[in-house]
Image (cartoon, rainbow, N blue to C red):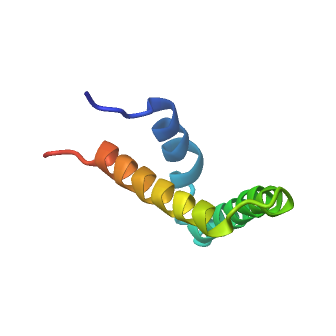
Amino acid sequence: MELQPEWLVGFLEHCLWSDFPEQKGLVSRIAAAGFGLGAMVVTEIFILVLQHGGNVLFWLKVLGISYGVSLIFFAACSYRNF
C-alpha cells in the first residue's frame, strides 16, 4: 500500500516549484515558517503543562518520540523502490 497525497504533490509542483528559479529563497522561507509554527505550538502545549503542574521532562520525551516516529513514518511513505 502506497500513501501518496496527489493533491499535495500537484500543489507543490504547480504553485511552488514552477516558479522556483525566480524565487530562490522560497524553500528557506517555508522552512523558517515551519520552525516558527512548530515552536508556537510546542510553547502553548508546555505552558498548559506547566500551569497544571505536569512533568515537563516526561512530555519532552513524548514529544521527541512522536517526532521520531513521524519522521520514520513519512520517510517510509516517501520511499520508492525504483
Q: Quadrant of the N terminus?
A: top left
For the point 46% across and 59% down, which residue is it? 65
Picture layout, residue 2 above or below residue 27: above
Question: Which residue corresponds to the image point at 83% horizontal and 56% vertical from the top-left?
Answer: 52
Left or right relative to 4: residue 41 = right
Asked which quadrant contains residue 80, the reply is top left
Q: Position of residue 67 (x, y in %)?
A: 49, 58
Is residue 8 among what the camera can see? yes
Q: Looking at the image, which is closer to me, 49 or 80?
A: 49
> Looking at the image, which is closer to me, 80 or 37?
37
- Left or right position of 18 against 34: left
Q: Position of residue 32 (x, y in %)?
A: 66, 69
Q: Residue at x 38, y 34 (%)?
A: 4
Nearest the eye: 47 or 68: 47
Left or right placement of residue 71 versus residue 33 in this view: left
Q: Is residue 20 visible?
A: no
* Number of marks in the rendered image: 0
Task: Say whether residue 49 is left or right of residue 32.
Answer: right
Quadrant in the picture for residue 60: bottom right
What is the residue that sits farthest to the right in this orientation? 51
- Residue lying furthest top in this view? 1
Vertical placement of residue 51 versus 15, above or below: below
Residues 74 and 43: in front is 43
* Residue at x 62% of width, y 60% of height: 59
The percent coordinates of residue 3 (x first, y second) are 35, 32
